[in-house]
Image (cartoon, helix red, strand yellow):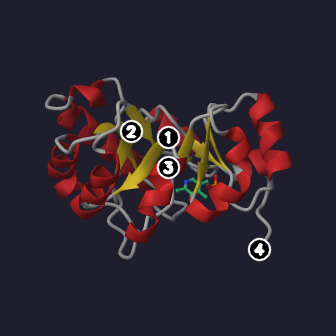
Amino acid sequence: MLAATKGVPPERIAEAVEAGVDALGENRVQEAREKLDGFRGVKPLHMIGHLQRNKARAAVQFFDVIESVDSLDLARVLSRLVWDRETPLEVYIEVNTSGEPGKYGVDPSGARSLALSAAALPGLKVTGLMTVGPLTDDAAAMRAAFRRLWELSSEIASDLPDLEAGTLSMGMSGDYEIAIEEGATLVRVGTGVFGPRQA
Ligand SMILES: *Cc1c(COP(=O)(O)O)cnc(C)c1O
């Protein structure tokens, strides 16, 4: 389980770390740098929010995993920053499994091509897929979105062994149970751990 820490101060994040969460996730590079520095090397730090090109350099210097790669353009930017690293940068491909307009993530039809192209870039290792479930109370729609990510992962894994043993990052406070039933290996929980976010 990854604790999503947006809006949460470091003291409370420390409690979650002590309680045994597996990873920490932030949506913004700047907020992560302000709050998560003391957790570097303690827990894997994941970028789970949309990553702007101009924040990519700071992001690869700080995070262990970038979960939100949703274009070849972004993958190329990241690769140019890390191509000469001894250990490749782990990235996940973010997929818009529900097709909601205005949502980040590559369309499911483009996920395979993006995953394979990104994996071929120097310095990058594609070790997971990520999705944000649909904004709905309809459990069947949530389940369909998560199932789609699982299907994509098994399809792509035949050509990408790193995915075979990789991560399926799906499920948040409101839908993680369904996501786990559909094969999630990492859930990203914010309010379920820390309580409601302050506005
Ligand atoms: C905020 C956030 C979460 C956690 O959401 P909760 O509903 O608070 O559990 C998970 N993933 C992403 C990408 C988020 O932005």
Tell me how far mark 3 sits from mark 2, CA to CA: 12 Å
Tell me the mark number nearer the camera, choosing from 3 and 2: 3
Tell me the mark number nearer the camera, choosing from 3 and 4: 3
The secondary element bearing badge 2 is classed as strand
Residue 61: mark: 3
Q: Residues within 10 Å of mark 4 (few under 14, many from 20)?
A: few
Q: Is residue 118 left or right of residue 143?
A: left
The secondary element bearing badge 1 is classed as loop
Residue matched to label 2? 90
- Identify the residue at horizontal 44%, vertical 48% (top origin): 66
Q: Where 175 sits versus 100, above or below?
A: above
Q: Is residue 28 visible?
A: no
Q: Quarter containing ligand 1?
A: bottom right
Tell me how far mark 3 sits from mark 4, CA to CA: 29 Å
Q: Where 113 sits versus 42, above or below?
A: below
Q: Position of residue 186 (x, y in %)?
A: 51, 36
Residue matched to label 1? 64
Q: Nearer the viewer, residue 123 or 43?
A: 123
Tell me how far mark 4 sits from mark 1, CA to CA: 28 Å
**Ligand 1 neighbours mark 1 (CB distance < 8 Å):** no
Q: Where 125 sits versus 57, above or below?
A: above
Which amino acid type is marked by label 4? Ala
Q: Earlier in the sequence, mark 3 or mark 2?
A: 3
Question: Which quadrant holds the C terminus?
Answer: bottom right
Q: Is residue 65 visible?
A: yes
Q: Is residue 60 left or right of residue 152?
A: right
Do the CB atoms of the residues marked 2 and 1 lie less than 8 Å apart?
yes
